[in-house]
Each structure stands twice: as structure tokens, then as C-alpha cells.
Amino acid sequence: MSQQQDEQSDKQKYEFRRVIEELQEYSGSGTQLVSIYVPEDRQISDVAAHITQEHSEASNIKSKQTRTAVQDALTSLKDRLKYYKTPPENGMVLFSGAIDAGGGQTDMVTKVLESPPDPVESFRYHCDSAFLTEPLEHMLADKGLFGLIVLDRREANVGWLKGKRVEPVKSASSLVPGKQRKGGQSAQRFARLRLEAIDNFYQEVAEMADDLFVPERHELDGILVGGPSPTKDEFLDGDYLHHELQDLVLGKFDVSYTDESGLYDLVDAAEDVLAETEVMKDKQQMEEFFKELHDGEKATYGFEQTRQNLVMGSVDRLLLSEDLRSDVVTYECENGHEEREVVDRRKNTPEHDCTECGATVSAEEAEREDVIDHLIDIAEQRGTEAKFISTDFEKGEQLLTAFGGVAGILRYSTGV
Ligand code: ZN
């Protein structure tokens, strides 16, 4: 994946996350919030027909309030579908419903999310008192690409772990004879043949893994190997794998099954290692930032300072806290002075007195935008890479609490 695509998808993921958080806050008074997941290859006319069907079935709902709410939601979604000839790449997810607005009031909310980070795999129609956001959350949790190998002496499977998704790819089975020798065979000869067969099988498994993983070795975040003992140990200790893959092995794990289900067991068994790897890259970024902060000159932090450097084109990597939820308000006074203030997303826009001339700018005259959107737009224009940093480790937490969720590593020292 190119850097450009990577950034775009980070930005897109951030926008998705924001919408999901908003949707999660909503609840309906009855089962009246509709969520529809549409795969890329689904005909829009099929989806529309399904909605029409649900609309007519909704006439059986006893509560008049719920019935009207569901039918309104369905009508609103059908209207939205008119804008599409075919679903966009990776499909789309539609949400609509009358949400509780407090004081017995309801508000109609309709959201359409196009092209999620992973393909929508199956059509889902869901009507409940909450929106169905879990499938989207799973996609957003997607990070990393791992190679999976499970084997014993009779069977092996290789596949991918892409984010949270396991993809079985290839399997092999061996002709290794069982431990019981047939009559008339010498014990020694039998043992030798058996060892040879095992060796051949390990080679075959390694070839299968090499074919799949070597071309992707620079994208791979690691390889997990599973199986019973001592098979996986023999396999790894015997250096059967391509040496570059061998270096990528994150660990070996006890797994009882070596069919496709073994790949899933392997991912479960490696849970801790995977969680660690996920934050590893974020940790490295923050280590580098702190090193520059203490001993170097190429660290910048805080919204205003980082923004200035960003505008100058001097930021190499922009570090943004995944949990940053703030807006930036831009005020331009009557004398043309432009100033900005960062505000909590839940707070109203304050009015502002220009620090240059004292002129007051009202909230209505100000422009308000999400901080991350604001910074990423500048970063994209300047060819700066943006990295989202998790708060699941100490220095990641510090980025949010001590640096306002915004920092950067500079290309060169600027003295700003
Ligand atoms: Zn002014």
C-alpha cells in the first residue's frame, strides 16, 4: 500500500469512527432504528425491493408510534438509494431512525457510509432500539497483516490474518506413515523412511508458506506458527522457512487442530502477542518523538506550534492521538487578523477578542472544524505523513493528555 493510500484510509477510518461514535450514542424508544449493510455486488434494485417489503411488513407493528417511526426510516433510506446506480467499492452501510432527543421528542437521523475499509461481506437488514455498528467497528479495528501457519505431521494450513479477519489460503496433507510399522519391515528402515517423509512434508509446508508470504514480506507485520509439540518446534528449528520469513516469526503457539479451524485457534492463542505488535509501531513513533524532544531539535507539539510547522512544510510525520475529539475554531476579526482556538467538541463556540486589535468576533462569524480534519488537510497538501497513535500505552496517553493530542517529528529544526 502506498503512503498516499495509507493516509487516505487513516483519514477515512477516522471519519468512520466519528460517525460510529455518534450513532452509538443514539437510542430509539422502540425497535425502530434501521441499519442496512450492502455488499458491493448487491443490486440497488434488490435493496430497494427489500426495503419496500419491510415497509409493508411494518404495517403489522402494533404501536402506532413505532410503526410510523420504522416506516419513516425506511422511506428515508429508499430516498437515499436513489442517488446510487450501484453500490460503491466495498459496499455501503445505511442507518436511519427516529432517535430519542429528550423530553419525549424524537429526531430523524439518516447516515450513509460509503466504501468502508473492508468489504461488506453479506447483506444485513437490522431493526432494533440501537444501530448495528459492530461490523463496522471490526473493520476499523483492522490493523496489520500477519502470516499464519498451522501444522502437525499429517496436515498443514497457511493463511492470512488481515486486521481481525482470518483468510485460509492453502492446505497440504502428508503421506507420513503412522507410528505402527507393518510386519516384515525392519524397525530401523521404518524409522528412517518415516523421518524422510516428515522432512519432505516440512519442506512442502515451507514451500507453500514461502510462495504465499515471501512476495509480501515487506508488508508483513509478522508470522505466527501453531501446532502440537514437537511438530512446530521441529519445523522452526529445522530452518525450513525462507530465512527472511524465519526472522518474521513472532512466536509459536500450542494449537490442537491443524485444519482451517486451527488458523482461528492460532489467532486466539496469539492474542497477547498480536495486541503488543499492534501498538509496537505507535510506540516506536512516540519513542522517536520523545528522543527529539529531550535531545534533539526535531520535535514539535501542541496544536498551534505543530500547525505552524505543518504549514511551513517542515513536518515529516504528524502524530495524532486516536482519542482526540476536539474542534478548532478560526476567528477572523474585522481588521483581517486570523486566530484559532481549540475547543472541546461538546462545548459551544465561544466568542473571541482579537489579541492584536481587541475587536470581538462572535461565534456566528467563526468557522468551526474538527481538529484532525483540519490538520490532515494541511498535511496532505504538504506531503506530510499522518500517524494515528493509540492511547493504549503510557507515551500514547501522554500525547493526548500532555500535548493536546497533536505532535510532529520535523524534517529539520525550524526554531518555531
Ligand atoms: Zn484583530
Image (cartoon, grey):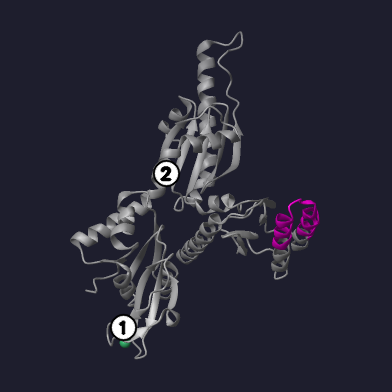
Asked if the residue at label 1 sits under 8 Å from ligand 1, the reply is yes
The amino acid marked with disc number 1 is: Cys
Residue 131 sits in quarter: bottom right
Residue 166: x and y in percent read: 56, 43
Asked if the residue at label 2 sits under 8 Å from ligand 1, the reply is no
Q: Which numbered tag is attached to residue 322? A: none
157 lies left or right of 309 = right
The answer to whether 352 is drawn above or below residue 335 in the figure is above
The residues bearing labels 1 and 2 have C-alpha atoms spaced at a distance of: 47 Å
The amino acid marked with disc number 2 is: Ala
The answer to whether 23 is drawn above or below residue 261 in the figure is below
Observer-nearest residue: 290 or 166?
A: 290
Q: Dot 1 corresponds to which residue?
A: 354
Q: Earlier in the sequence, mark 1 or mark 2?
A: 2
Q: Which numbered tag is attached to residue 275? A: 2
Q: Which residues are magenta?
A: 49-73
- Viewer can see residue 212: yes
Residue at the extreme top of the image, as rendered: 183
Is 246 magenta? The answer is no
Quarter occupied by the C terminus: bottom left
Q: Secondary structure at mark 2?
A: helix
Q: Secondary structure at mark 1?
A: loop
Residue 22: x and y in percent read: 53, 59
